[in-house]
Structure formats: structure tokens, C-alpha cells
Amino acid sequence: MEIDLKGRVHNLRLGPRQALHPVFEAVSNSIHAIADASTEKPRIRITFERAKGDPKLLDDQEKEPVSSVHIEDNGIGFTDENLESFRRSDTTYKAPRGGKGVGRLSWLKAFDEARVTSSIQIAPEEWVRREFVFSLEHDGVGGLKQTNGGGPRRTRVSLGGLKPKFSRHYPQSVEVTAGRIVEHFYQQMFLHGCPQIILKDGGDEIDLRTVFKEQYAEHAEDETFRVGNEELVIYHVRNYRAGKERGHYVHLCAHNRTVSREKAKTLFGQVPAGRISDPSRNGEAFWYAALVSGTALDAAVTAERDALEFAEDDGFVFDGGISKSALNAAVGERISAHLMADLDKLREETQERIETYVKTTAPQYRPLLKHRESEVRSLPLDLDGDREIERELHKLNFEAEAELRKRGAALSALEVNSVEDMAEYRESYLRFIEEENDFGTSSLARYVVHRKVVLQLLDRFMGLADDGKYELEEVVHRVICPLRVTSDDSGFEKHNLWIIDDRLAFHEFFASDKPLSATPANTTSGKEPDIVVFDKSLGFRESESSDSVTIIEFKRPERADYTDEKNPIEQVYGYIREIRAGRAKDERGRTVHATESTQFIAYVIATLTPRLRERAENAALLRTPDGRGYFAFNPTLNAYIEVLDYAKVLADSKKRNAVLFRRLGLEG
């Protein structure tokens, strides 16, 4: 069977973020070659070359893009057997070591070519030097040359022409690259020893064996655990030396090499983004890595060695494979147990922040603290500010309410056939009712918190603006109700008419800053009350007249130019006469009349300046006991009117809501 090399390479999976994978494959070959040669002083040298002045240079890079990588070793080299295996795709030559026979194909996926030079010992005093090019252009191995001599052992693989989409994902720091290589071969180094590996990138050079010993091997613990019938090993590694650019990761390994890497936070949600403080080392911070291995993972690795093929998530398959969800859950438990003591302080600090936020700002989440304590304590430990706390609590609250609905449905469908069943049912029912009551009141709590915030906002707008001038009545109007809308545009939850009168929270129809001709009054008048409310609970049903109409008029705070022509009391009386002269319609389109029995309630909201007080007293309005308002009933118009100071409206609303705020701990 012939192999279409271009097609095979094209179909090979290798994403840009796996840019170092071809280097890993070359280093792995070097490690195997060194083991086969039983070299006394094994060494590998990796050199990164960067293309200066490359037009593909990214603006935010500190160094030029990588153009080529050279890997040298003093292993056994390209012997006849190794060269024959190299020529054959998908060979099983290295199967006992976990080799898939396709690793070198990743070179051609990311690079234009690989140039190989190898000095091989074919007899005690006899050496051969082999050179060739491996590329798609040559359909594999091309330009093979062999000359006598050339010892001692030395093999150099030069990967050249790195494609830009891979180059931009190469680390800028030699320390980061070193860490990635060490973590990829961590298990190999830990179990089988590590040859000297020198990494050179420009003027920077680093010994990976030293990195391994100081940053990984020195602070490592291993433990066995089971996932179903499979036994696995997890290595807990603490890196106290690495810089800020690192992270916490879980490495899934097969045949002594990392196959996939993901953030530890995805398996154990409480792993913070930054370094973890170790209380046993006086708070010294570390990065954490978990390396997981086992025969089950060896058997599951793909040919490209870039992924593991797991069983379906619904459980275990008959051949002993494990599901990804089961593996993640088990690894997450081991990480949690290992980091428990290190995260205790951070966990308590986070819990205190959450409780403070709930008690002072979001009491609607109090049922979570009572009924979902373990879930709250399992929230991320690096929540950044109240916004992230709110987001997590909102998600948790949604899940809790959904779970309650399921439990309620299950209880409703439960059959009770015995005294024992009745006792169990009663206990479950009582637990459910307690939680349901607590979570039910949380919705009301959210609305009460909303009222608190709105009153605080209104309090602010009643003071001086930044430029020293009082806010216009339009601004206060917006706080209480949106401008130029009707109830058809904005539901009851979008207005705050309750600030003036709690009875206005629900109604049939309201219009804000709209002409009377646009309201159910059906008059041709173009006059625009600030707010007019028609009460559905009393009128506009089967009767022939409306029972209640409320008119609200705002005046600019501290306005002092009231005259007989600009008298707000006469202004609202004028609106009432306009409505009485028109016709209204019910929800079925039938005409109803605003008759003499229709009751009108009018509010004038303003600052009680001397001029306005004078107009109120001239209209025979009575002063309220606190002196901050006037009221009267006009029997001719069947209208009750109040002229209220802004401060009184705010103070009265605060008093009406005080018991709710106090109940939720929102005083002040």
C-alpha cells in the first residue's frame, strides 16, 4: 500500500496552539536514541532561531518570530533500522514505547522541512555520517548522502521554515518554554532520569535538568486513585520559583509524556488565577501542576498524541475505558484534597466577603447561605468585586430555584401507601416548604432592594447638581417614571410610581409626558400632564364610567416664578376638566364616560417656595401637619389634590418602606 504523504500530513491534527508539539516529538526521539545508545554523558541541545526583520513580526512581541529549531543529541542516531522505520508512515517500530509512527509528520505540518545529519557507529572503530532532507517536496526522505567517518555520535535535526500561524504561538520567554518542555516530559524525567537538556533562545540559555530538579522534583507528591476499575497515578507538583506568567494546570499523560493540558480551575473551580500561598512555608507562593497517568490513558491516546479518546459520559465501557467526566470528577477531588489546607484562609476570606455582600447589598440571596451553604463555600475564591459575587450568586440561586421546582413536582406525584410512606413524605414536604418559603421571599427581597436603590437615587437628585444648579423636574420625573411612554410601552416593573402612592403600582393604563389625546380619555386636547394614570382595578371594566384617574405634575425644584397664569393648581384642574369633557374606552373598545362620579386624584410635586404656598392657600388648600404640603377636596370636580414638597415625597416613601428595609437589614 502506498502512502500519500501530502494527504497524510494535511489530515494530521495539529492546531496553532500546539506549536511546540513538533519540538516535543524531536526531543522524544532524542531521549529514545540516548536510551538505546546507553550514553555515559547523555545530552540534548535545543536551539531556537528567530528571523530578525521578518515582516510577519507582531507589534506586541518582544522578540522576533521563531523561524527554525535545531535539536541535537548524542544518542544512537539514524541506524539502518531507525532510518527504515523513519521512511515508513505509521510504523509500529516504537509501539512498545508508546510510539505511533506519525510524530515526525508533525514536523511537516508546522515547518517546511527537516534537515537531518547523523553520525552512526557501525563498528567499534567505524563511523558513518548520514544526511538527508525530510519534506513534502521530496515526498518524504530525499537527498540521502552517506560518507565514511564523522564520529563521535551526534544527530542534529534542523526544523526550518516555521509557518507564521505556529510561530506566533511560541513563548517569548525561555523560562516559559523550558517549563512547557519539562512539564511535557515530567513523568519521563521523574521515573527514568533526565539527560542534560540545554535550551537556547537567542542570548538566553537554560538547563532543563536544573529546572526540573529545582522547580518540580523537589516539591512533588504522588498518590494512586481509582476511576471505576482503572488505577491511575497523580503527581502533585508545586513550583515555588516560576514567575507570574505561569498558571495552574492539569496534564494528562500517556507513555511518560503529556498528551493534553487544561487549566486546573476547570476540574476544581476553587483554584485561583494567581499563585497560591503555602501556610506551611510562611506564605510562600507557588504554581500548582497535576500530572495524571495510567495504563488506561496509555491505551486511550490518539495517533497524533494530542488527545485521549474517552468512553461516553454516561459511564464506563465494557473494555475498561473511562469517561472524561468521571476522570475530571476524580481528579478534581484529588486536587481539592491536596490544596485544602492551602486554600482554607482564602476560602474563609471569600466566604466573609460573600456574606457581607448578601447582608448589606443583596439580601435576596440569604436563602443560599442557609440552604445551599456547601455550594456557596464551593464558589470561586478569586471573585473580583461585588459584580462577580453577584454573578455567581445569581447563577447559584437560579439553579437552586430550578431544583426546588423539580422537587415540588416530584412531591406532588409521590404516592403514599403506608404509614412509613406518610412519615417520609411529611418530612420531605416540611423540608421543601421551608426552602420554598425562603426562596419565595427572595424575589420580594430583590424588589425591596430595588426600591432602596431608587430612593437613594432620588435623594441624590433632590440635592445640588455638580454645576451648583438644582436638577430639573425632568430628571426627577425620569427616576419616578420614564418619559414619553405609556403602559403599552413600559410594564409596571419599569416605573416607580409607588414613590408617590403605593396604590399606583398597578393600574390599567398610564401615560408619561404624552398628550391627553393619546390616552383612553380620547380627547382632542394636546395638553400634556406629566403623568396620568387610569385605574383598571376600579374602572374601565363593565361599568359605563371610570372610577379613578390620577394626575401627577412635577415642577422644577426651587422654582420661584409662580404667577396666576402659571399656577400649577389651576393647571391640574384644567387637565381634569379636559378629561371630563372627553370620552374614554374600555379594553373592548366600548365608549365610557368620565362622569361626575369619576374620582380624580391630583398631585403637584414641587419645592414649597413662598409663592407656591401663597397659591395653595389662595385655593383654600389645607396645610399638612408637618407643614411640607397642602391638600383639599374639590367637590365640584370630585377631585382630591395634594401639593407636596419633594422632600416630603421622599421622606414619606422612606417611612412607608422603612419596615421592609429594616427587615432585610438595609437601614441607612
Image (tube, rainbow, N blue to C red):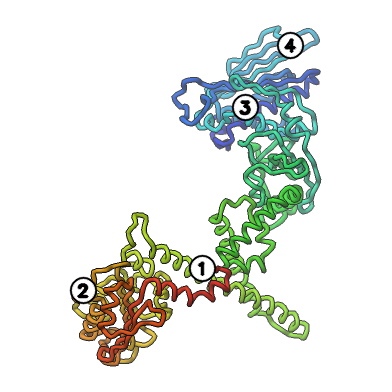
Give the crowd class for mark 4: few <14, some 14-19, many >=20 residues within 10 Å.
some
Between marks 3 and 4 in the image, the one whose residue lies nearer the viewer: 3
Disc 1 to disc 3, how far (Cα)? 53 Å
Disc sitting over residue 174 in the figure: 3
Disc sitting over residue 399 in the figure: none
Per the image, the residue denoted by label 4 is 152
Per the image, the residue denoted by label 2 is 563
- Circle 4/circle 2 CB separation < 8 Å: no
Between marks 3 and 2 in the image, the one whose residue lies nearer the viewer: 2
Q: Earlier in the sequence, mark 4 or mark 2?
A: 4
> Does the image show residue 22?
yes
Q: Secondary structure at mark 1?
A: helix
Disc 4 to disc 2, how far (Cα)? 110 Å
Front one among 256 and 93 = 256
Disc 3 to disc 4, how far (Cα)? 29 Å
Horizontally, is 242 left or right of 136 in the view?
right
Question: Residue 167 location in percent, x, y?
Answer: 53, 29
Q: How many marks?
A: 4
Disc 3 to disc 2, how far (Cα)? 81 Å
